[in-house]
């Protein structure tokens, strides 16, 4: 019996581009069942492979005004449709963009599709509860159909079920809402955004009043407010569209070498970089859990005194980072079989960017210490002197330590 359920929500768009990779690198790799939780317009193509392959199908109306969906959900959650109800629309007064997109309002209407995304999650939550899904499955993955999967999905067995697991990218100040791995310990706290909006709008208004909100920030806030920890792992797929695909947000740019639009460059860049590291599903163990630099992705380079090496843009030089101040960019390493690339990158969860610097070979010289030799010359040792200058101690042959970026936990 398959013990993982992959749930595609909202739509099954771009299936012509994505289905083969989704089946090969997600369903087949995980030996997973497929569920759909989507709105079905009148012209829906029921012959598409997502619909044909799905074991579970949950559908909901395609509202012209998604405020009607919130009203319906409120009636269900509060179970008193004919009496006074909390005014969830006051949340439209909060400073923000897109997190309630789809709700029509003459003065406060937002762009985007936040209300649609949250509604789909509510229908999925009710399905999971009504069908007692976690008596049949150990993990539930919530995702979308327009992801291009060129890398095998990591096995859920290497991902601790007490955490909500999200790809590290497209966070916009919060966490991405495009893909998540859930368990019985945290599915409700991830999926119940709409329930909280319509049942406790006043409480949420005062908790949220002093911030600027989008979907990603609200998702992170909602999870942490309910005391559930979050773990990140590398972003391993990217969103695409065809020329005629409808989109409520980013249109992307056309890539002639692929023959389709790529909607978000950071997703694509992360996936392309990760393709050099993940050659088989087993490689994910090193990337997510390993503490050595031989097989790693976005691994933080430290001095032998456990200090990060940051780049000071104003002074145009590298400096050991103040432990109390998070630098904008630090030296990091991608490694595969003892060789890799040093680059500058940020440490902010949800933001993927990098500036390539040097190809290197990694050699272990102690329990936790390594030297870095530049591959171009074969002789030059990457040293503190040539990074930090002669004012930094210790001098001479330099060894480095490494820290796995993905060991970080986002605590409530």
Image (cartoon, rainbow, N blue to C red):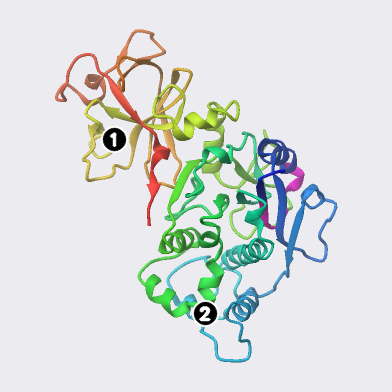
Q: Quadrant of residue 94?
A: bottom left
Image quadrant for the N terminus?
A: top right
Verify CB contact (< 8 Å) between mark 2 and mark 1.
no
Q: Residue furthest bottom?
A: 83
Q: Position of residue 203 (x, y in %)?
A: 42, 77
Image quadrant where residue 298 sits:
top left
- Residue designated by label 2: 88
Which stretch is magenta?
7-17
Front one among 184 and 335: 184
Residue found 27% across the figure and 19% down from its top: 399
**Is residue 323 placed above or below 41 in the rendered structure?**
above
Left or right, 354 with respect to 243, comes to left
Q: Which quadrant holds the C terminus?
A: bottom left
**Pick the front one: 172 or 87:** 87
Distance from label 2 to label 1 (Cα)? Answer: 46 Å
Residue located beneath label 1 in the image: 311
The x, y position of residue 196, in whole percent, is 51, 72
Q: Secondary structure at mark 2?
A: helix
Side of 276 relative to 174 (left or right): right
């Amino acid at each position: 019996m398959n013990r993982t359920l992959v749930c595609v929500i909202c739509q099954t768009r771009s299936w012509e581009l994505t289905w083969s990779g989704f089946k090969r690198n997600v369903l087949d790799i995980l030996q997973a069942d497929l569920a759909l939780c989507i709105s079905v317009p009148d012209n829906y193509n029921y012959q598409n492979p997502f619909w044909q392959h799905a074991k579970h199908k949950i559908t909901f109306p395609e509202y012209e005004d998604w405020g009607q969906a919130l009203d319906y959900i409120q009636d269900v959650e509060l179970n008193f449709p004919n009496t006074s109800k909390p005014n969830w629309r006051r949340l439209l007064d909060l400073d923000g963009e897109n997190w309630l997109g789809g709700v029509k309002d003459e003065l406060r209407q937002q762009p985007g599709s936040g209300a649609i995304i949250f509604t789909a999650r509510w229908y999925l939550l009710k399905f999971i509860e009504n069908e007692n899904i976690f008596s049949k499955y150990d993990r539930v993955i919530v995702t979308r159909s327009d992801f291009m999967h060129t890398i095998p999905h990591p096995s859920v067995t290497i991902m601790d079920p007490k955490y909500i697991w999200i790809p590290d990218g497209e966070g916009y100040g919060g966490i991405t809402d495009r893909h998540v791995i859930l368990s019985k310990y945290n599915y409700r706290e991830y999926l119940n955004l709409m329930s909280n909006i319509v049942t406790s709008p006043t409480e949420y208004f005062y908790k949220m009043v002093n911030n600027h909100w989008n979907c990603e920030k609200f998702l992170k806030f909602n999870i942490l407010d309910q005391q559930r920890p979050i773990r990140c792992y590398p972003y391993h797929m990217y969103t695409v569209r065809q020329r005629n695909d409808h989109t409520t947000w980013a249109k992307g740019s056309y890539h002639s070498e692929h023959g389709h639009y790529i909607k978000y460059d950071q997703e694509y860049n992360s996936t392309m970089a990760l393709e050099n590291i993940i050659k088989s599903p087993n490689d994910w163990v090193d990337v997510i859990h390993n503490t050595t630099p031989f097989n790693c992705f976005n691994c933080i380079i430290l001095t032998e005194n456990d200090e990060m090496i940051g780049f000071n843009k104003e002074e145009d030089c590298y400096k050991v980072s103040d432990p109390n101040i998070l630098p904008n960019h630090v030296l990091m390493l991608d490694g595969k079989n003892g060789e890799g690339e040093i680059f500058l990158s940020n440490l902010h969860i949800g933001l993927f960017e990098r500036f390539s610097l040097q190809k290197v070979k990694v050699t272990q010289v102690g329990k936790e210490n390594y030297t870095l030799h530049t591959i171009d010359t074969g002789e030059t040792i990457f040293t503190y002197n040539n990074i930090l200058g002669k004012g930094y101690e210790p001098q001479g042959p330099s060894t480095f330590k490494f820290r796995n970026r993905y060991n970080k936990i986002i605590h409530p």
